[in-house]
Image (spheres, coloured by chain):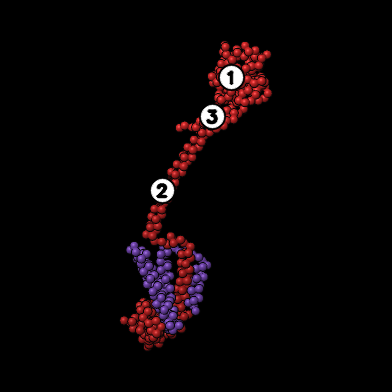
């Protein structure tokens, strides 16, 4: 009641303003707000009315004057601050405002520096925590998936490397067999020296065949003129004017035939009665056997692509 | 004038000392600040209306702060702290708006 009455007195000139300016739009918010706002004020105004005789307010604020005009509301306040500004009330107000400014700045600072977590409420923290847990679960699932993928890829690359390795090894083996790669290993060397008549190419071919039978894996023949020819499956031997012709290269004697394989086996193979050595001797020539241990075959055979044969799978 | 100086002194003190808010006070400080702001605006308006009263101001200031903190405290205990502090902020905000509207009318006659 008082509030409304006071509100009415507090606003006497104001209703005149809102009406011309904005009309209903501003009035409704203004009046409830005003009613709410009045909370501090009504108490203020009601105090003089309710307790006109007592309270320090009276002491501070000149006991006599406010009471006669409590209904006006404005009058008592005016003399009071005028005299009590320097008194305890003023000091208390100042202190409160200092506190307000202090707290305001503290709050601003803590709000800007903290990441809201320290001031969050337990239920918010629980929600944030569960969100983070869910996220962590998702991320660890992702980690597991990625690790599996990585293992697959690593296994794939290992498999590929192994296949590559095997292919390279096979290519090396085939290269040695086909005469396209140099080779070295335990082996034997035969020196064929002609007698009064030059040795026939057929004798050399016999020796080569015997060595093949004895397990020679790579062979090379060097002529006395320094020409070296790798002997492969398709090598051919023909008698020539100045020696023999092997795969189109003319080799003069004496000839060195180098073979990689088991040396004793190959030597035995050539020395069997009626074998190559016997034939060379009967042809007037000689065979000198040399076992240097490790022999090296560096002459290469040039191969082209097969013209007719195609890979069949 | 004294009030403005006191406010400035408080701000400067806060800036100089840079204290950290105690953990127990953290939920209440912002609400208390808003409540105090409401009291300050009410005081300014009362001043402009010519009905300002020291004791009135002190009492409303302190009680505003305490009641706001109490409401938030109760809300925390009841498990609706977030909603209640929102409600307190809304109410205080409405009051501040009302006070500012009164000040505006007083100052600009509009």
Answer few, some or many: residues within 10 Å of disc 1's Cα (few below 14, many 20 plus, some between 14 and 19).
some
Residue at 36%, 66% (x, y): give it.
B83
Residue at 42%, 67% (x, y): give it.
B29
Quadrant location, the C terminus of chain A: top left
* Circle number at residue A205: 1
Query: Is A166 left or right of A25, judged from the image as shown?
Result: right
Judging by the rendered image, the residue that carries numbered circle 2 is: A141
Q: What is the secondary structure assignment of the residue under circle 3?
A: helix
The image shows residue A173, relative to residue A33, as above or below, that is: above
Quadrant location, the N terminus of chain A: bottom left
Q: Nearer the viewer, mark 1 or mark 3?
A: 1
The image shows residue A166, relative to residue A222, as above or below, that is: below
Estimate the spatial distance between the alpha carbons at disc 2 and disc 3, rounded to whole Å.
49 Å
Residue at 34%, 81% (x, y): give it.
A3
Residue nearest the observer in this picture, A23 or A29: A23
Query: Is A305 left or right of A123, judged from the image as shown?
Result: right
Q: Which of the two labelled residues, at mark 2 and mark 1, occupies the earlier sequence position?
A: 2
Subunit that carries the residue with mark 2: A
The image shows residue A292, relative to residue A180, as above or below, that is: above
Residue nearest the observer in this picture, B31 or A295: A295
Query: Is A298 left or right of B72, judged from the image as shown?
Result: right
Q: Which of the two labelled residues, at mark 2 and mark 3, occupies the earlier sequence position?
A: 2
> Can you see residue B80?
yes
Q: Which of the two labelled residues, at mark 1 and mark 3, occupies the earlier sequence position?
A: 3
- Note the chain letter of the purple one: B
Judging by the rendered image, the residue that carries numbered circle 3 is: A174
State the image coordinates of residue A51 (x, y, percent, origin top left): 35, 82
Subunit that carries the residue with mark 1: A
- Assess whether mark 3 and mark 1 are in contact (beta carbons under 8 angstroms): no
Residue nearest the observer in this picture, A60 or A270: A270
- Note the chain letter of the red one: A
Q: Nearer the viewer, mark 2 or mark 1?
A: 1
């Amino acid at each position: 009641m008082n509030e409304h009455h006071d509100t009415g007195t507090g606003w006497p000139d104001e209703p005149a303003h809102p009406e011309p300016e904005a009309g209903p739009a501003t009035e409704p918010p203004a009046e409830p707000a005003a009613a709410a706002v009045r909370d501090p004020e009504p108490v203020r105004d009601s105090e003089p009315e309710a307790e006109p005789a007592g309270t320090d307010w009276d002491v501070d604020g000149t006991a006599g004057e406010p009471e006669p005009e409590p209904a006006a509301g404005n009058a008592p306040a005016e003399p009071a601050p005028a005299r009590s500004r320097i008194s305890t009330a003023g000091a208390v107000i100042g202190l409160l405002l200092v506190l307000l400014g202090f707290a305001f700045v503290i709050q601003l600072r803590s709000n800007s520096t903290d990441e809201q977590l320290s001031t969050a409420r337990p239920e918010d923290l629980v929600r944030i925590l569960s969100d983070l847990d869910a996220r962590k679960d998702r991320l660890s699932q992702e980690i597991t998936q990625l690790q599996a993928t990585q293992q697959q890829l690593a296994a794939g690359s290992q498999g590929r490397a192994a296949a590559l390795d095997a292919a390279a090894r096979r290519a090396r083996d085939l290269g040695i067999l086909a005469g396209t790669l140099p080779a070295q290993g335990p082996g034997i060397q035969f020196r064929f020296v002609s007698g009064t008549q030059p040795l026939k190419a057929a004798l050399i071919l016999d020796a080569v065949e015997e060595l093949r039978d004895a397990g020679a894996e790579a062979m090379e023949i060097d002529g006395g003129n320094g020409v070296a020819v790798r002997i492969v499956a398709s090598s051919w031997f023909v008698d020539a004017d100045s020696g023999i012709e092997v795969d189109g290269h003319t080799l003069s004697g004496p000839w060195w035939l180098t073979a990689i394989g088991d040396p004793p086996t190959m030597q035995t193979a050539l020395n069997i009665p009626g074998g190559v050595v016997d034939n060379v001797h009967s042809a007037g020539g000689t065979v000198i056997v040399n076992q240097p241990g490790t022999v090296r075959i560096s002459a290469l055979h040039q191969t082209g692509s097969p013209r007719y044969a195609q890979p069949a799978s | 004038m004294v009030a403005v100086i006191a406010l400035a002194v408080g701000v400067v003190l806060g800036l100089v000392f840079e204290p950290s808010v105690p953990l127990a006070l953290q939920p209440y400080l912002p609400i208390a600040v808003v409540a105090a702001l409401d009291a300050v605006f009410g005081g300014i308006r009362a001043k402009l209306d010519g009905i300002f009263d020291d004791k009135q101001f002190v009492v409303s200031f302190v009680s505003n702060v305490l009641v706001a903190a109490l409401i938030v405290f109760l809300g925390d205990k009841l498990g609706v702290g977030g909603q209640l502090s929102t409600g307190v902020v809304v109410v205080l905000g409405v009051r501040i708006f009302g006070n500012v509207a009164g000040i505006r009318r007083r100052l600009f006659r509009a």
